[in-house]
Image (cartoon, rainbow, N blue to C red):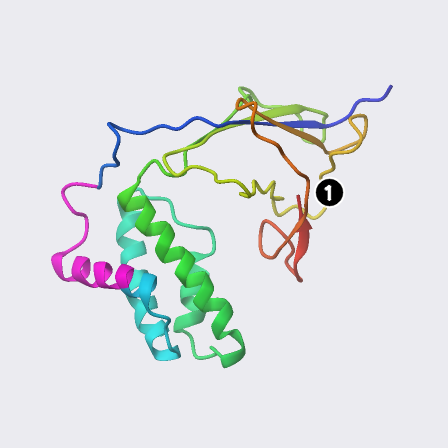
């Protein structure tokens, strides 16, 4: 029986709340004028669809907000900066408007959650405690402790790829074959169903959407 790569993803559904509510950063890391613009941006994003010009104006505010947040040690979404650059550049077309508008909505919402529920993402840990040889077979366990924003019925956990050209696709059928992944939860009422989602970019496909587990 030959060796296999076994990546075991353990999902622990635990809710971590701080005294029943989340704590916003204090003192505020934003200047008062930018804070006022950010609060207006949050409200507009939740209630009013943007036109092309409004989208550019919102992007300018998000850009300043994201920079200030990152300088405080905050972690930004991977493609936030490139999306802002595309929206503020000269090549924004009507065809790409809807895609960028949806992306911007998500980045604004994610930054809002970072401020209002700092522990909303929870914690991801791994059993890797020492280095190992590249190309060797390893069994890796990742444990996700869900944060203050719970996973609702129908939620997805996406096992994305890293940007390596020779990485094989993940599979859940054959434990003796390469790139085998299993998943389980500490909550006995949780049921997992395998599916694929098309993803573009550094964790999916560069030349087009690629199926991701």
Relative image position of residue 36 (x, y in whole percent): 17, 61
Residue drawn at point x = 56 percent, y = 23 percent: 188
Which quadrant is the C terminus positioned in? top right
Residue 158: give x, y in percent of width and height: 58, 43
Q: Name the quarter where the N terminus is drawn.
A: top right
**65 relative position to 187: left or right:** left
Q: Which residue is mark 1?
A: 169
Query: What residue sits 28% from the left and 59% below the top?
Result: 42
Magenta residue span: 25-43
Task: Name the residue rendered at 37%, 44% in the picture.
Answer: 75
Dot 1: within a 10 Å radius of its alpha carbon, few (fewer than 14), some, or many (20 or more) residues?
few
Q: Position of residue 115 (x, y in %)?
A: 27, 45
> In the picture shown, does residue 101 fall above or below 2?
below
Instruction: Establish if 197 lies above or below 142.
Output: below
Quadrant of the image occupied by residue 52: bottom left
Is 116 left or right of 97, judged from the image as shown? Answer: left
Magenta: main secondary structure equals helix
Instruction: Judge whether 184 appears above or below 77 on screen.
Output: above
Q: Residue at x 47, y 51 (%)?
A: 78
């Amino acid at each position: 029986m030959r060796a296999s790569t076994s990546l075991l993803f353990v999902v622990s559904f635990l809710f971590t709340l701080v005294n029943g509510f989340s704590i916003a950063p204090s003192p505020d890391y934003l200047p008062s004028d930018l804070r006022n613009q950010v609060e207006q941006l949050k409200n507009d994003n939740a209630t009013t669809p943007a036109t092309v010009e409004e989208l550019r104006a919102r992007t300018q505010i998000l850009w300043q907000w994201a920079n200030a947040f990152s300088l405080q040690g905050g972690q930004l979404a991977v493609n936030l900066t490139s999306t802002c650059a595309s929206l503020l550049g000269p090549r924004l077309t009507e065809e790409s408007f809807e895609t960028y508008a949806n992306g911007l909505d998500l980045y604004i919402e994610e930054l809002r959650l970072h401020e209002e529920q700092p522990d909303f993402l929870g914690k991801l840990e791994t059993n890797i405690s020492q280095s190992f040889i590249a190309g060797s077979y390893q069994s890796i366990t990742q444990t996700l402790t869900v944060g203050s924003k719970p996973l609702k019925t129908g939620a997805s956990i996406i096992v994305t790829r890293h940007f390596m050209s020779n990485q094989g696709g993940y599979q859940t059928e054959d434990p003796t074959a390469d790139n085998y992944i299993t998943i389980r939860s500490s909550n006995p009422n949780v049921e997992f169903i395998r599916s694929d989602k098309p993803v573009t970019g550094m964790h999916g496909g560069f030349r087009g959407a690629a199926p991701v587990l």
